[in-house]
Amino acid sequence: MVRQHPLRRWVVGVPLFLPLMAAVGAAVGSYAWVLAVAAVVAAHFVRQYRVMVCCVLCALLCAVHVGMQQQRAEAARDLWEGRSAVRFEGTVQDVLHHGVILNTGVDGVRVVVRGKDMDFEAGDRVCLVAAPQETRRAMLPGMFDGEAWLRSRGAAAEFEYIRGERLGRSFSFATLRGFGLRCRKLLSTCLMPPGCESDARCQVLCALVLGDKASAEDGTMMDFRRGGCMHAFAVSGLHVGILSGLLWACLRLLRVHPRASKVLLLVLVGVYVVVTGASVSAVRAYLMLAVVLLGHLLRRRVSPANTWCFAALLIILVDPRQCTAPAFQLSFAVYAAICMGVSYCMRDSSLLGPDPFIPIRLYTKIDYARRRADAALRGTVLVSLCAWLVSLPITVAHFHVINTWGFVTNILIAPLLVVTMAAGMLALATSWLPWVGAGCWWAAKLASSWLLAVVGWCGGLPGSFVPDVAPVPAGEAMLVPLGYGNSSAVLGNPGLVLDAGNEISGRLTLRPALFHAGFTPSGVLTTRALVSRSGGVPALQEQWPELKVMTERELRKGITRLAGPAGVYTVYPAPEGLPARVAGNLVPIIRWEHAGQACLFIGDAALPTLRSLPQEALRADVVVLGYNPKMPADDPELLRATGARRFILLPSAAASGLTAQELFPAEFIRMGENSVLRFSLPPGRDERSTDRNATQ
């Protein structure tokens, strides 16, 4: 008997693996081309020439696809550059929270058009007029990166909606997807009746059963994010698998013929995938299910590894950008890990079951129960552990977070997911029945509350949701721009946060900036009674529940000293008699002392407030200065009296004349509008900014 080379046995057993590797290498490009070359060489080495030709064709197809898309996107951006408004006529491919993804019809170029007054649906033919908008960049690794998000969606640029009109409807997959989303919106009313939009249980049901997260509050999603089970909050391959099992059990219970059951199951699951939005993970699960069912119908042997490669290869050939998307990587990597865990569990000896040397025909009922319990327990633990270990590096690479107890959460919620999905599906099916539908809806909400309780408990464990960076030293501080000249600051770690922005900037900018930079705030001080300075406090409290909140009104009685782990904070309020018409007139000045060094945070305070400081309070090593439009605190004599050799100018100081260094010998650093700036009090350490255009 001639022994085959192990590589040849693998290529013959899984012939689509090498073409998949070649397609991934060509789609990613750059150094990843090594994968494509290695795939071709490996196929030639084992003399599988048909596989080698398939590798070359897949690599060329992906390379041409990606190259043409990049070339067309660059040409379109050059055409739009310098124009105040652009007119588009195309098809809506997808609907966002406040906007749409539009296929312009010009060489297949896509754009993102954002606006709150848009009521278009996927598949609509529209004519839009929009203004070019600057793409939001990530201030820190882990924060939202607008450029990466546009690339993942295949969009060339981002625009702000001005006006538009609907021209009709096209016949395409987008139209089918739009019809499915309309059906999902209609079905969501069965799980979330009017008046229940704020009920977290209904939000979980809509997201878990139908993939509808439009009404989900940030606090509800934060619980799943902290618990490390965000994949359970939206329809994914897990939900498609659970639904397939439930439908198969129902069809067998109704005594439907096995061949008819497989065809019917394929149709029903396909409709479910379209209705729930056709996410990448759901499409992956459906493709693999379709291959397995068709193989059984045709009485052909089905290889799980080759089926996995087929689904991945088909998705990449249709859209090569998907191979760099976190959803694609997590879906396929976790499924592969689950298969390996199940395979190991089947080969491993029993731990809690009966002796493996006892013949099965001699098993008692207790032995059968012990065997099933052992398989279920070991399978759940191994599958969850394998999935967590594989998803951990991908999560760190894309999101820069670590879910320490994610595998524990998945073990605990595994049975609850099945119960909640079954109850939710039953509530949808019986919603038209007066009494039965109400009872099923109550049962679904009860199961959802159990799921929320378990997820919330796991998310509250120590270190359950931490950034992939070490905590910064106690003597460090950070300035965060919030847009429109506003900014926030955190002094020390754990330290005091000055202003929290409005609800949107606090949730989307300040909270992730503090988290991903390694800061843990201990308190918040709002320097003025404006929603634009205090509206983001609830967003910070969701992340750090023990956060102490203080307002400038509480500190107007006199000089206040606040002691914390990062030093001493002295708040100097504005003197009495200042006009309150300009909110910045009543802004206090904060002096932060740590390890013998001092930082004087003047901010947008008025000049009389700076003059009211005692002489010893003026002395500082670092001065952070903003700009007050009525009474600017830019007196050179007072600033020279601080003795500071380093001045940091906030975005609000753009109109100030302090950018001229000839006033007195000091180092001036201007904070960028789109970047955070970190500095430390101990001498000998320079400021670090993520803004490449920071000026000194």
Image (cartoon, rainbow, N blue to C red):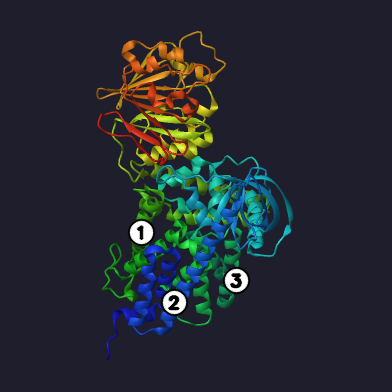
Q: Secondary structure at mark 3?
A: helix
**Residue at figure coordinates x 37%, y 80% from the top left:** 43
Q: Amino acid at mark 3?
A: Leu
Viewer-side label of 3, 2:
2
**Residue at figure coordinates x 38%, y 81% from the top left:** 12
Identify the disc placed on residue 212: none
Residue furthest toward the top?
577
Disc 2 packing (10 Å; few <14; some 14–19; many ≥20): some
**Residue at figure coordinates x 62%, y 47% from the top left:** 83
Total marks in image: 3
Q: Quadrant of the N terminus?
A: bottom left
Disc 1 packing (10 Å; few <14; some 14–19; many ≥20): some
Query: Which residue, given by chain and number where applicable, does mark 1 sit on?
Result: 390
Disc 3 to disc 2, C-alpha distance:
38 Å
In primary-sequence order, the first of circles 3 and 2 is 2
Side of 632 relative to 412 (left or right): right
* Nearer the observer, 482 or 433: 482
Q: Is residue 191 visible?
A: no
